[in-house]
Structures are given as structure tokens and as C-alpha cells.
Image (cartoon, rainbow, N blue to C red):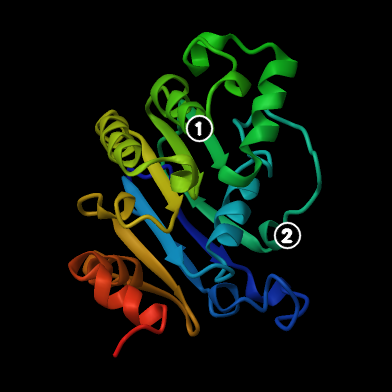
Amino acid sequence: MSPAFAISMALLRDTVPDFERYPFSLPAVRHLDKLTFHPAVTFIVGENGSGKSTLLEALAVALGYNAEGGSRNFNFGTRASHSQLHEHVRIARGYRRPRDGYFLRAESFFNVATEVERLGIPLDSYGGRPLHEQSHGESFMALLTHRFGGQGLYLLDEPEAALSPQRQLAALARIHQLVKGGSQFIIATHSPILMAYPDARIYACLPDGLRRTDYEDTEHYQVTLDFLRNPRRMLDTLLGEEP
């Protein structure tokens, strides 16, 4: 029996109305059979528009989270922009039930912060300061540090969007604390720092669908490494100044 809170997400292919229509036309969805999650940390990576956030959103909504983010107690909508993919997936759950959970979307966290204020949620859950009085990065770290209580299922969509490299390292350390405390993370990301988490399961969204891959084989790692090894050479190539 799996210790994971979320074991897998399967596409109910017989119910899909049209594989030529978004979001089913995305290669990550079109070729999806079953996506199996690591009980600790799973990363979904890929180019912009490859479908990683769409998959994570469908998982979150199917699990009962608000489409714009927050805990399962949040029920608000600023703009209905999520796809109908959640209606066509089946989630396999483990024998354990999470004591905590949260869906973090970088692009709509401002709306979540506004809802936190509207509901009058105690600020000690978010570092003792209103989220709108913190920088984007500070509010993300406050969420990780103070709101995430452990033994939870945490879905993070591009959390690095507001974090400096140093804060990404701090986020990695906090994620590890929570994993040791029995939590599970499923993260859509572009960050080669975050996806370096040891023994994580990484899925890459490719033109022929999802493929499990090693950290060093991800495009994010390879491009970053090539750039840092010789930034001048890459800049000369990009800027057309190579002799």
C-alpha cells in the first residue's frame, strides 16, 4: 500500500469530448494514460504552454481545491479560467488522509491573499503580517514557513516565480522538513534549483507526451549548466556577436 496521499492521476480517455480541443489537444494530455506520483516529491517540468500547469490545476480541482489556489476551505472565483480537464480524470488516493493541504498558484496568489484578508484568517498562519504588506517572495516564504503545517498534500505551481535563488534554496530546505514530517509535494516548475531535490520523481512535458526523466537530463539543467560554464560564449551566440 502506497504511503502517498495522491497515488496517481489517470485520464478517462473514453469521456474526452474532443482531443483536438484545448486542453485535450496538449501533448501532455493527449498522450496521458496515468501519471504516478512519488510519495515525497514529484516535479512536472516543461516549456511554457506544454501543459504542466494545466495538469496540476486539474489534479488540484479534482482533489477539491479552489482553482485559483488556497486550502480546501477556500471557495472564491475572480475569473473562471481553469479548464474542464478535472472532469475527465480519476485520482487514486492512498490509505492515509492528509491533515493539511494547499494549492499554490504563482499567477493568482494575489487573489488568494485578498481572500485571506476578507475571511479574517489569523495572520500568525502567514508570518504575522498581512500578505499584501509583504513582497511576493516574502509572502510565498511565509506560506511555506508558517501556513504549511506538515502531514499535508501541497500542490505548487511555479513557486519559484517570486523567489530569488537564495530563497529557492531556503524553500528546498523547508520542503525537506515537511517531507520528513510526512508531507507530499507535487510541483510544476522551471527551476533547476528546486528540481534538484534528492530522489524526486521528474516528469517532462514533451511533444510526444509525458516522460519520466533524470534531473541531469532535463533541458532546464542542461541549458543552465551550459550558460554558467561559459556565459560570454552563449551571449555572443544569442546576440549575434560571435566572430
Query: What amino acid is at disc 2?
Result: Ser
Identify the disc placed on residue 117: none
Residue 137 in the image: x percent, y percent?
47, 33
Query: In this picture, is 155 found above or below 102?
Result: below
Residue 158 in the image: x percent, y percent?
49, 50
Q: Is residue 83 visible?
A: yes
Query: In this picture, is 62 found above or below 71?
Result: below
Q: Secondary structure at mark 2?
A: loop
Q: Closest to the observer: 153 or 195?
A: 195
Q: Closest to the observer: 162 or 240?
A: 240
Q: Residue furthest bottom?
A: 243
Q: Secondary structure at mark 1?
A: strand
Q: CA distance from mark 2 to mark 1?
A: 22 Å
| Rendered-image quadrant of the C terminus | bottom left
Residue 39 in the image: x percent, y percent?
33, 47
Q: Is residue 37 visible?
A: no
Residue 139 left/right relative to 108: left
Q: Which residue is mark 2?
A: 83
Identify the disc placed on residue 101: 1
Q: Closest to the observer: 222 or 56?
A: 222
Residue 165 picture quarter: top left
What residue do we see at 63% from left, 69% from top?
Answer: 12
Query: What amino acid is at disc 1?
Result: Gly
